[in-house]
Image (cartoon, rainbow, N blue to C red):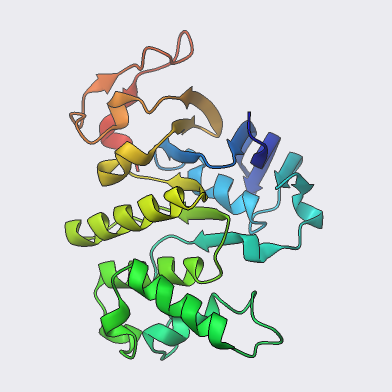
């Protein structure tokens, strides 16, 4: 077995006074592509945000590359793509400026050198946005915004990619580009944790699926066909490996 890159053990977390994670265990090993699935409010986004420290945990342990998260400092090894938002957060900026911000952790005192500029160009090439490098992000479509956010995460050359619903609201052409980008990163040895609404064109890349319900792990194993792109929305399915007595997975509620 390869070493764990992400390890959550007995993790609990609350938003306000509401319990969201109820003692979950999750391990992602080097080179794996793991999809986190579940209904709205199941705790998917909270789980990934707890990994990067955006959500404090009230109990349990979170480790990155074998180091407790509270002591982890080498964030250039981690690329994070948040849920879809405007790439510049409302600040006027070009595509290159936004992607370059992802390289700051690798640059020396914020001064960009040739290697930094080349890394930014490579990231833009990977997501098919090199021809828009000088454009304002305000002029981009939703799918193009998402490509820029992914390029920003890739610019530092991370070993671990954490992506929160990268396909949500993205047109099919951009989905295919993003799938090809991830294929390239996986081939280069990256480890990937994805929150997904549906597997879509990423399905062939997924090694494991972890299904959450009410802050608990319902399934951890092969991607359930019930949550694949061929499922019939509104129909109930139980994966053959789901825990005994588990309620059906309602595909129409997944997000």
In this view, the residue in front, 51 or 126, is 126
Q: Position of residue 123 (x, y in %)?
A: 42, 71
Q: Is residue 184 visible?
A: yes
Query: Is residue 40 shown above or below 98?
Result: above
Q: Position of residue 85 (x, y in %)?
A: 39, 69
Question: Left of 41 or right of it: where is 229?
Answer: left
Q: Is residue 87 visible?
A: no
Locate the N terminus and report the quarter of the image it occupies. Answer: top right
Residue visible at 58% across and 55% down in the picture: 159
Residue visible at 47% across and 24% down in the picture: 221
Image quadrant in which you'd find residue 225: top left
Q: Position of residue 9 (x, y in %)?
A: 70, 33
Q: Position of residue 164 (x, y in %)?
A: 45, 54
Question: Left of 156 or right of it: where is 176?
Answer: left
Query: Is residue 21 shown above or below 65?
Result: above
Image quadrant in which you'd find residue 215: top right
For this orientation, the residue located farthest to the right is 71
Query: Is residue 12 shown above or below 238?
Result: below
Residue visible at 57% across and 61% down in the picture: 158
């Amino acid at each position: 077995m390869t070493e764990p890159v992400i390890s959550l053990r007995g993790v609990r977390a609350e938003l306000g006074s509401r319990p969201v994670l109820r003692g979950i265990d999750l391990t992602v090993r080097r080179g794996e592509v793991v999809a986190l699935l579940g209904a709205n409010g199941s705790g998917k986004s909270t789980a990934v945000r707890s990994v990067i420290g955006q959500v404090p945990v009230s109990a349990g342990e979170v480790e990155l590359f074998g180091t407790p998260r509270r002591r982890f400092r080498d964030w250039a090894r981690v690329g994070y793509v948040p849920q879809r938002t405007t790439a510049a957060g409302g600040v006027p900026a070009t595509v290159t400026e936004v992607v370059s911000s992802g390289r700051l952790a690798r640059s020396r005192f914020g001064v960009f050198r040739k290697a930094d500029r080349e890394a930014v160009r490579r990231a833009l090439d990977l997501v098919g946005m090199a021809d828009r490098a000088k454009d304002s992000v305000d002029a981009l479509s939703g799918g193009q915004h998402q490509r820029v956010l992914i390029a920003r995460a890739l610019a530092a050359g991370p070993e671990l990619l954490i992506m929160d619903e990268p396909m949500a609201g993205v047109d099919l052409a951009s989905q295919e580009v993003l799938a090809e980008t991830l294929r390239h990163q996986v081939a280069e040895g990256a480890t990937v944790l994805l929150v997904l609404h549906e597997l879509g064109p990423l399905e062939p890349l997924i090694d494991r699926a972890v299904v959450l319900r009410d802050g608990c792990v319902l399934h951890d194993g092969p991607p359930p066909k019930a949550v694949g792109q061929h499922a019939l929305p509104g129909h109930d399915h139980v994966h053959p490996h789901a825990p005994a007595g588990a309620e059906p997975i309602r595909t129409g509620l997944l997000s």
